Image (cartoon, helix red, strand yellow):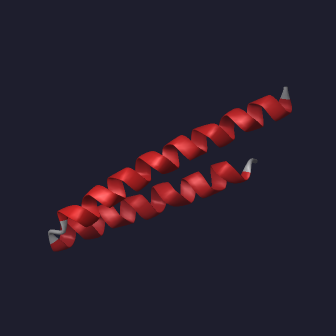
Amino acid sequence: MDKDRVVGSAKVVKGKAKVAIGKAIGDKKLETEGEAEKVAGKIQNAVGGIKDTIRDA
């Protein structure tokens, strides 16, 4: 498993936490940062998946 997949997954989890906290306290900025971090994590996870596929080919 590529390290990008691990880091990407961690970013998704962190982003979800920021969104939840932002919603709970009414902080739109934190909520938006969390959404952006989730997207970045999903992209990084996908890049890691592509690297794994290439390596395994």
Extreme residue in the left direction = 26
Instruction: Left or right? Give the position of 39 relative to 53.
Output: left
Instruction: Left or right? Give the position of 20 relative to 8.
Output: left
- Taking the spot 68% from the left edge, 33% from the top edge, the residue there is 50
- Percent across and percent down for residue 15 are 40, 59
- Taking the spot 37% from the left edge, 66% from the top edge, the residue there is 17
Above or below, 35 relative to 25: above
- Taking the spot 37% from the left edge, 51% from the top edge, the residue there is 36
- Percent across and percent down for residue 35 are 34, 52
Above or below, 26 relative to 37: below
- Taking the spot 84% from the left edge, 32% from the top edge, the residue there is 56
- Count of numbered labels shown in the rendering: 0
Location of residue 25 by image quarter: bottom left
- Percent across and percent down for residue 23 are 20, 64
Above or below, 25 relative to 40: below
Image quadrant in which the C terminus is located: top right
Instruction: Left or right? Give the position of 42 relative to 24.
Output: right
Extreme residue in the top direction = 57
- Percent across and percent down for residue 40 are 47, 48
